Image: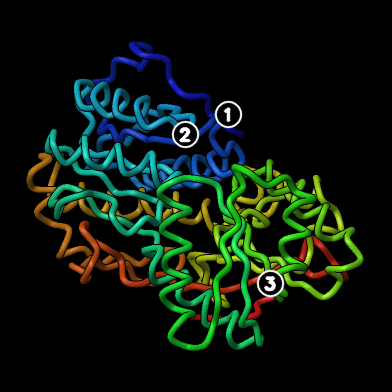
Amino acid sequence: MQTPPSPPGAERADDSAVRIGALVPLTRPGWVEAGRHLLAGLELAVCDVNDAGGIVGRPLELVVRDTAADPQRAVAAVDELARLGVAALAGEYHSVVARAAAARADALGLPFLCSSAVLDALTEQPATWVARLAPAQSHGWQIYADFLLGAGHRRIAVAAQPSVYWASGARILRDTLAPRGGTVIELDLRSLAPTAVCDELVDNRATALLLLVGHPEPAVSIVRSVRHDPRLAGIMIGAPAGQPEFAEWATLLGDDGTAIPFLRYLPERLSPLGARVETALRERLGEAPSFVAFEGYDTVAVLTDMLRSHGVDRARIAESWPRVAVEGTRGQIRFSRTPGISVWQWAWTPIQVVDRDPAQPDRFRILHAG
C-alpha cells in the first residue's frame, strides 16, 4: 500500500524519531510507476528497521516529497527537508531531477544517497555529501552496447528526445560502438512522427532501433508503428533505460511490448535477504517488484547502518561513505571514488540485459549479464 507524500508541516511531532527525507516521483510528468516501486522499497525497509528496534531505540521515519520529475520542485524539497532536520536524503529516479537535488544537498551539507538515477555527472564538481547505488550510465550502457554487438547489430538507430540524459546515452553508445565497427544513426523526434521513424529505419538499413524516449509516450506509439510495419519485421527494438520493466508497459502494448531488451540491475539469483524482500515487496505492491523497489530498500539499509554507527550528525554521516560495508538485497554495498564519477559510487551493482518473453509476457529472459 502506497503512503502519500506528507504535506508541508503535517509531519507528526515526534522528537524521538530519526528522519530521512525521501524524494520520489509520484505524479505526472514523473514516471509514477517507478516512483511507486521506489517508495515501496523505501517504506518496507523503514518498517523492517523499526521492527528490529529502530536507530538505537529511536524510530526511523520517512518524510516523503513528490518531485513530479521537476528539478526546481526537487530543489525546493531539499531545502524544506533540510529545515525539517532530516539526517539524510534518499531516493529519486529521474537523472535530471537527481542532479538538481544532489547539487543542492551538497551545497547545504546534507547527505544524499541517490537510489536510482544513473547520469554520470550527478554533480558538476566532486561531491563529498552525495553517494549513489545505481550504476553510472556509462557503465550500464556500455554493457548494453556489448550485448548489441554480440547479437550481430552494426547499424543501430537511436530515436531520441532532447534531454541531458538521452544525449548522454546516445554519446555512450556511439563512443562504445564506433571503434568496434558499429554505426549509430540518430533520429531527432522533434521533427519525426512515429510513422516517419519507420521510413528512416528502412532508408538507413538499421537492424536495431533504440528508444531514448519518455514513457508511455512517445515510446508506445513508436513501438506500435514499428511492430506493424511489414518492412521492419526483422528489426530489433531496444530500450536500455528500462521502460519495459514495469507492468504498465505490458498492459499498454501486450505482445507488441515483448522481446524489447532493456537494462535491469538485479543478480541472476537473489540472496536469502533479497528473496525475503522480494516476497514482502510483492505483497506490498500487488505485483512483481522491479529492480527500482530493491534500490529503495537498499538505500534505507545503507543509511540505517550509517545512522546506527555514526549517529544523526550530518558531517559524520558524509565522512563515513568510504567505510560502508552493508549486505544489501543484491550484494555487498561499498562506496568508492570511481574515475569519471563525481559522487561516491557503488561499483558495481549486478547488471543484466533482459526482455519480456513473447511466450509469457510477465516472464523476463536474461539475454546478457555484465
Is residue 115 depicted above or below 69 in this figure?
A: below
User: Where does the image place residue 88, in percent across and percent down from the top left?
Assistant: 24, 39
Within 10 Å of disc 1 (Cα), the crowding (few <14, some 14-19, many 20+) is few
Q: Residue at x 61, y 41 (%)?
A: 33
Q: Which residue is mark 1?
A: 28
Which numbered disc, 3 or 2, marks the residue that appears first in the sequence? Answer: 2
Q: Which residue is mark 2?
A: 69
User: Where does the image place residue 231, in percent across and percent down from the top left?
Assistant: 87, 68
- Which-is-in-front pick, marks 3 and 1? 3
Is residue 269 depicted above or below 6 in this figure?
A: below
Is residue 138 depicted above or below 68 in this figure?
A: below
Q: Amino acid at mark 2?
A: Ala
User: Where does the image place residue 323, in percent across and percent down from the top left?
Assistant: 15, 65
Which numbered disc, 2 or 1, marks the residue that appears first in the sequence? Answer: 1
Q: Amino acid at mark 3?
A: Ala
Q: Alpha-carbon distance for marks 3 and 2?
A: 29 Å
Q: In the structure shown, which secondary structural element does the residue marked by tag 1 occupy?
A: loop
Q: Which residue is mark 3?
A: 208
Check whether the beta carbons of the residues at disc 2 and disc 1 lie within 8 A of each other.
Answer: yes
Q: Amino acid at mark 1?
A: Arg
Q: Is residue 205 left or right of residue 305?
A: right
Q: Residue at x 63, y 77 (%)?
A: 155
Residue positioned most to the front: 203
Q: In the structure shown, which secondary structural element does the residue marked by tag 3 occupy?
A: strand
